[in-house]
């Protein structure tokens, strides 16, 4: 009696479904269907793509030990600190309106914005972003702090800190991709503390253009051009660098962040910077290089002269376990390495060379170069452990003990949820 | 063979259900049934109403440009800033216990409470709220900052800033609705910095009564009465106003927040305020008006005299696209406009007139009036874009350049998730 | 025709299921099955235990009134404040990696870490924790601030504040349970402000061992031993206590936190502490006691002598409604009381005696004892209301009015979500 059999099966399957329901409560929505996800954080999005919500974060616990020019008195110092501890909220409402609400609780006592922005994506392929966010300048800056190769981004950015720093300001940025190989962005930002004497904020302008004929993980050819200019009434022209070790500023007792050009109040009023980017990746191997040049103009009639700061770096990275670094044309940037072996994770080694120089006719050229070697262990998609060894040497820049070189070890434990 | 057919259908439907489950993981609870929701934020609540959780927030990115009396030197200033950037957590446990945990990361460097309170709703219809929250005084204050019509609330509240400001204190409030037309609240608050010389905190008392015989969206007749009194040993009696432009205090370089009565340390010890509210709405049209009077008593034997500050406003608003402003009797307040046209959103225009005055026998009466016209675009339920033009003129109050009037433009982009 | 009946039933049940689905949207995942939960906060975890996410918090609104030695001038003071207002995020990624991201917004103006840590649980039964967290020392400290019996932990901890305070530092801790009756932890921490002159941070070492042959709610026999030592170049040896009333430091006007040993800059360089714990619980009754001794060594050649501070307490608690205090061997600590009567909650009464003493040959021994009686109402698993009465008396310690004793009342409303 096949019919009876069938019907009996159907009934008992239903009974099973009903009883399972009796022990585990149901979860429904009062509107569109929703898909949820947890990988340590939490996401919910409607299947019709109209709405979404995501809560995550990143925790970067760092330890640095350093000596020589990295310190004031030349004796070994160290520091343990949270480099970043960001709570990240983002979402979509009515499909085309996105927000990012990222607060950094990194060092104790105060919270500051990592990003607070609203993006309209309705003019495809162009996105318009408004709010507080870092201006777009440079490949390593475009790459998330979670997925840069070295623990700290290159010292060349120290030469022009305003080009990719929000400076507590607010801005507007237009960006977009085209033809599967072009990405560009243009924006302006008004730094909180860059105002004229009447309290009118000055603008910083940023342009970035990326051409990436090869634009996928393990198969990257990336060329980029950046330009930034800011209006300012007056600034002191100071140039200084952490030489890739952040602990030097976290350590208030003996950390040193040497001057490459002295601050001279009220002598400069012109400020612009150029940047070049190049990167190539083939499977687990990648090479990337950036060049930055900043022009600081002395005021007419100033006792000082124009200043020029230039820097470049080259970085070689190789993933021993074979994974390629991710790449995204949107944003023109590298992305995470996702380990294939769930047991041992992914292992990456790298070497970076940084070179910076500052010039003004009133002082002898100051220079520094930093060698960084390091290893990254991507235990899984959430955990990354990094160890870097750095060796810096400077010309015509010394600490109070007369050191013009120094060594450092940096360690990081990162949890991205 | 209809029977066979039926059974076969049942079996294949089940098979389908099972296979769908194999591709998409299931979501269940280990207790009561739950309904979840995302509109950019996230909500979960049990269907038995015993428990709920909600995470949302608001981001208000503002830009103000202003001159004349709005500045110190009379020259045009401007400022871009986050007026509010609030992370809002709220929930219910065991049906009658609710919490609100709202932190404002608005301006950089520090976080402050928007609200941190616990409410017991078990004595229906009376609610008891304990914690840090703004005292209840005035219709525009009762209305959420997300859904007020102008970008800033009326300048009349500047005359008595403590009447609806939590001042980092803590309080208790009892409130409730009755007969579908009455709402009332009574509470006290202890401001952090209002203590006697022995460190005993003084109380602020608030009473609000609302009679709203018409109390639904587009059909409102609302009358309200407010009284507030605070104990204080000693205060300086200073009266000043931003004249409805917040950027004047955000701009530390040239923003001006003029005094309407000078601070004189230790001369005053009595402080109370009255307020009246009236509102009427018919479909897309609404008119509302508020009156406030504050009495500041000089100490006996003081060299100063009693001060009196009075203010009133009238606001007319009209939604061009036809939507009515929401209204809630609970709280005696207007609520959001929900656009019916999903493509073009809702458009609202308004005009507000504010008038404030301060008097003491020792100085000539100071006065100001502000005209505000504006337009609000409610792109959807999450996004609101506002533009206001303001024209202020004062009597017997000038900036350092001698200006007694000024103009301002304020813009806001709001994301409520 | 039973077959037909069956098949018809199956078909209509399916139709019902389909129509129910039509009104309420479905919730699924794109991967592993997930269970969600809300008890005022929110949790999601995959059923395979690989991933989880939890968002909750605690709000403790306190009010203290106090006089005598608790104040500077001896006259009654009071203060209302948030003792804690912690937003708590935690989760698991890839089964063995856990994080805790707890920010305390307790008192306005600044946020600070309650905990920011990453724990690896893969070396079972041993856990390795890295980041910022309070070192493990003492039974009352190990117990969550939500579930300690008195409003404040014992004054004996004031004698050695660094032994269980993270001090804005970072550390590593190894802990584990064994044999269902042993728990132990060992760790070190580097306080932010404990550095040598070269900016090298000093270590604090902590050891804790617990033997609990009875280790379940209502059936506890717990013995514990603690040792902590810190390296430090130099410290002032100051000893002071809030005498169990936190409002004394929240009240900046008249609150008093008396010195039991004066600060003398640069005279001390040795610092270690011992602690003993004992607890017994039988059903609703519990008794617990702790002893702490700190040895402060004067520098060789110092004008000061070694200091010794000792303290002990005894606490008796009884749950009138019969519930037992929870207990967890992991962490060696008491846990929450869960009310069985959903209508009236659980009621607990307790008495605690604290005794502290400080000695150095250069001053007469200073002492204090505090009697605390209190009642806790656990309205449900989220709400706890506490009232404590405290009576303190000191020897050889007075405020500016000459008081050596004082009374206090402390109230707390707690919401744990």
Image (spheres, coloured by chain):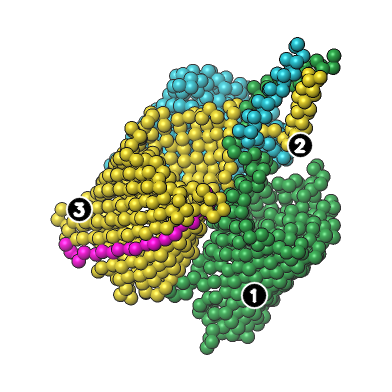
Chain colours: A yellow, B cyan, C green
Of badges 3 and 2, the one in the foreground is 2
Mark 1–mark 3 distance (CA, rounded to whole Å): 60 Å
Is B288 situated above or below A197?
above
The quadrant of the image that shows the N terminus of chain C is top right
Mark 3 / mark 2, whichever is N-terminal: 2
- Residue shown at 67%/40% (left/top)? C35
Query: In which quadrant of the rendered view does residue A263 lie?
Result: bottom left
Subunit ID for the residue under disc 2? A
- Quick one: label 2, few (<14), some, or many (20+) residues within 10 Å? few
Mark 3–mark 2 distance (CA, rounded to whole Å): 73 Å
Is A359 situated above or below B52?
below
- Residue shown at 44%/75% (left/top)? C197
Residue toward you, C34 or B378: C34
In the picture, measured across the screen, residue A178 lies left or right of residue C219, that is: left
Q: Is residue A13 visible to us here?
A: yes
Task: Check disc 3 and report the residue beneath it.
Answer: A297
Do pointers 1 and 3 mark residues of a single chain? no
Do pointers 2 and 1 mark residues of a single chain? no
Q: Which mark is residue C273?
A: 1
Magenta stretch, overall SS: strand
Q: Which mark is residue A23?
A: 2
- Quick one: label 3, few (<14), some, or many (20+) residues within 10 Å? some
Tell me the SS state at disc 1: strand
Residue toward you, A70 or C356: A70
Q: Which portion, as a residue range, is magenta?
A: A361-383
Residue toward you, B1 or B152: B1
Query: In which quadrant of the rendered view does residue A239 lie?
Result: bottom left
- Residue A330 rendering spot, x and y as whole percentages: 38, 39
Asked if the residue at tag 2 contacts the one at tag 3, i.e. Cβ–Cβ closer than 8 Å, the answer is: no
Q: Which mark is residue B298?
A: none
């Amino acid at each position: 009696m096949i019919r009876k059999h069938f019907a009996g099966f159907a009934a008992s399957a239903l009974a099973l479904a009903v009883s399972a329901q009796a022990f585990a409560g149901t979860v429904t929505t009062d509107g569109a269907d929703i898909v949820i996800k947890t990988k340590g954080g939490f996401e919910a999005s409607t299947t019709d793509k109209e709405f979404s919500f995501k809560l995550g974060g990143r925790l970067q616990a760092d330890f640095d030990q350093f000596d020589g020019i990295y310190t004031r008195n030349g004796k070994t110092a160290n520091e343990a600190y949270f480099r970043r501890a960001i709570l990240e909220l983002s979402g979509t409402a009515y499909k085309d309106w996105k927000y990012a609400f990222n607060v950094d609780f990194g060092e104790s006592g105060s919270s500051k914005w990592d990003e607070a922005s609203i993006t309209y994506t309705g003019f495809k392929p162009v996105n318009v972003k408004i709010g507080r966010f870092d201006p777009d300048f440079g490949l390593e800056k475009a790459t998330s702090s979670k997925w840069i190769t070295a623990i700290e981004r290159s010292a060349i950015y120290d030469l022009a800190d305003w080009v990719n720093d929000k400076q507590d300001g607010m801005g507007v940025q237009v960006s977009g991709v085209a033809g599967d190989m072009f990405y560009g962005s243009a924006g302006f930002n008004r730094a909180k503390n860059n105002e004229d004497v009447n309290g009118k904020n000055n603008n910083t302008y940023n342009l970035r253009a990326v051409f990436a004929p090869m634009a996928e993980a393990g198969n990257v050819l990336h060329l980029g051009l950046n330009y930034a200019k800011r209006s300012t009434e007056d600034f002191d022209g100071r140039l200084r660098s952490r030489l890739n070790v952040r602990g030097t500023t976290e350590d208030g007792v003996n950390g040193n962040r040497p001057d490459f050009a002295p601050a001279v109040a009220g002598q400069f009023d012109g400020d612009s910077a150029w940047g070049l980017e190049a990167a190539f990746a083939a499977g687990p191997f990648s090479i990337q290089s950036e060049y930055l040049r900043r022009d600081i103009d002395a005021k007419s009639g100033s006792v000082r002269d124009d200043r020029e700061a230039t820097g470049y770096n080259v970085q070689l990275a190789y993933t021993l376990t074979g994974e390629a670094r991710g790449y995204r044309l949107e944003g023109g940037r590298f992305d995470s390495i996702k380990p294939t072996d769930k047991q041992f994770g992914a292992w990456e080694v790298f070497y970076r060379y940084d070179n910076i120089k500052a010039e003004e006719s009133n002082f002898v050229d100051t220079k520094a170069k930093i060698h960084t070697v390091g290893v990254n262990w991507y235990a899984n998609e959430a955990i990354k452990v990094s160890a870097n060894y750095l060796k810096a040497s400077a010309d015509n820049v010394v600490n109070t003990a007369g050191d013009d070189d120094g060594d450092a070890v940096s360690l990081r434990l990162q949890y991205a949820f």
